[in-house]
Image (tube, helix red, strand yellow):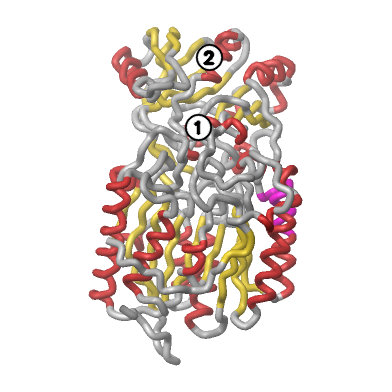
Amino acid sequence: MDAGSGVAEGDEMRVLIGSLIQESNTFSPSRSSLQDFYQHHWVTGEEVRSIQTQNELWGFMRKAEEEGVAVVPVLSANAVSSGMLAAESFRELKIKLRTLLQAALQREGGFDGVYFALHGAMVAEDCDDTEGELLTVIRDCVGPDLPLVISLDLHANLTERMARQVNGLIGFRTYPHIDFAETGSRAASLLFAAIRGEVQPVVKLVKLPMIVPAENSQSTHGPFAELWEEARAGEEKGDVLVTSLFPVQPWLDIDEMGSSVVVVGHAGKEQEAVREAERLAGLFWEKREAFGIELFTVRQVIGKLREHRRDEGPIVISDSADSPSAGSLGDSNAVLKELLEQQVQLTHRCLVTLVDAPAVHKAITAGVGQETVLSLGGSLHESLPQPLFRPIEVSGLVRRIGDGRFYLKNGYAKNTEAFMGRCVVFDIGWISVLITERATFSGDPAMYRSMGLEPSEAELVQVKSANQFRAEYGKLTPHIYMLDSPGYSQANLMALAFRKLVRPFYPLDEVTDWKEHPLYGTKSTQREDDIDGLS
């Protein structure tokens, strides 16, 4: 079904738009379902226009409004990071996407182009390349010829199948991510130019047999920032339209895994695009060791805390191994346990957080102002055959009870409402533990502030985030330490049990020449009719 045939002079441009976003962690024992989307964010049809979160779709719609382009929204959906999506839920998700697309096409008629915001690192139990399959569903509905542009998180795992089915591809340029809306706007500009015939984009993908720690791939400084300087210099030469760099989310044990470079070039100048993609991939490879990160034990950080001056701002420790935004469970008590063993509750003001629904229930039952004993941590591990964390019993004071709703102010996505379930502040001496029923993004100070806890007034603050927390916490202090701690999204990639990666693979192995790897290098992105009638 061909849903459109271009824009005649004087006609209004009409594009079909949507988003479907979730990030997976294949090492996490949790499983995700459609219910996670429904509970977090699932909006269809015209209601999509009312979203206030300044994300990619919001940025696209603002750009379309500026240029007088009519948009027809299909779906805006995302769920918090988790383990893999259950196979049955993924099957249902594809059916729902197809149904919504077909209904929009039948209701609205022809279109001139399509835009979808995806993440690029969603994995299902029975499918490593979910975005490749979702794009196949979209292509099956709109036909092979309609211009299709997508945007992706820079932690996306790019596959040949994904690159073959799109006319353009735009990735985030910032980490910590702060360019959600700008990414959608840039995708709109590329799509509109392609529809008008001003450009004829071609997509070139280069894969690398390499993963790097997320904790040291920020775009503000360091090796990734240096790569972006090179990418922008290449764009300014004019041989390519846009470049995207993808230091893939490393907690994925899947087929066709690896970091990548994607260049959108000009038709007729494919060789220039290939040369630029390979140039940047070579630089990426040369810098691979520079992405290494220094890790500290909790005990080492406590030693620094005892020497730290209180007027220098708080020490922030990143327990990224238990990061809910990386698909971990959030119920680790490793930091709290070490703080208590070292008697830090007697000397230093600390903010700590963990997920423990039974403890929240017991604290609420006790009531504000009451002393009680709680079993804290490991509540989501109790049913696992090999739990990473076991509960510890602690006595303390229930200081505050909350409903768990707060708004992310800046760093992650402006105006996004986060929900951590019912929650309590539980004081153990000078340590205030924010205990939540549900896992949520903990890298914004707004989480603590929503419960009357001010991070800037503490001496030590725990976050469970690999890098995104720097967007806001970096404004409060330069004293940031990455922890060497247990979990499913740990910074020590050598400790993860990868099984699907085609070896040799960096940093697990010594790789002498990435171009000679059988599954990596410059990939074919020539468009094919690989629609398989998925339902």
- Residues marked 1 and 2 touching at CB (< 8 Å): no
319 left or right, relative to 106: right
The residues tagged by marks 1 and 2 sit, at their Cα atoms, a distance apart of: 18 Å
Tell me, yes or no, whether the highlighted magenta stretch contains residue 220.
yes
| Location of the N terminus (image quadrant) | bottom left
**Residue placed most toward the observer, 339 or 58:** 339
**Residue placed most toward the observer, 320 or 351:** 320
Residue 253 numbered tag = none
The picture places residue 419, in percent across and down from the top left corner, at 38, 37
At x 38%, y 65%, the residue is: 136
Residue situated furthest bottom in the rendering: 9
Q: Amino acid at mark 1?
A: Tyr
At x 31%, y 43%, the residue is: 33
Note whether 335 is above or below 494 in the view shown.
Answer: above
At x 54%, y 50%, the residue is: 257
Which is more foreground, mark 1 or mark 2? Answer: 1
Q: Which residue is mark 2?
A: 337
Please rate how many residues cluster around mark 1, counting C-alpha atoms within 10 Å: few if below 14, some from 14 to 19, many from 20: many
The picture places residue 180, in percent across and down from the top left corner, at 52, 56
At x 50%, y 73%, the residue is: 167
Q: Amino acid at mark 2?
A: Lys
Please rate how many residues cluster around mark 2, counting C-alpha atoms within 10 Å: few if below 14, some from 14 to 19, many from 20: some
The picture places residue 490, in percent across and down from the top left corner, at 56, 32
Q: Which residue is mark 1?
A: 488
| Location of the C terminus (image quadrant) | bottom left
Q: Secondary structure at mark 2?
A: helix
Magenta residues (range): 219-229
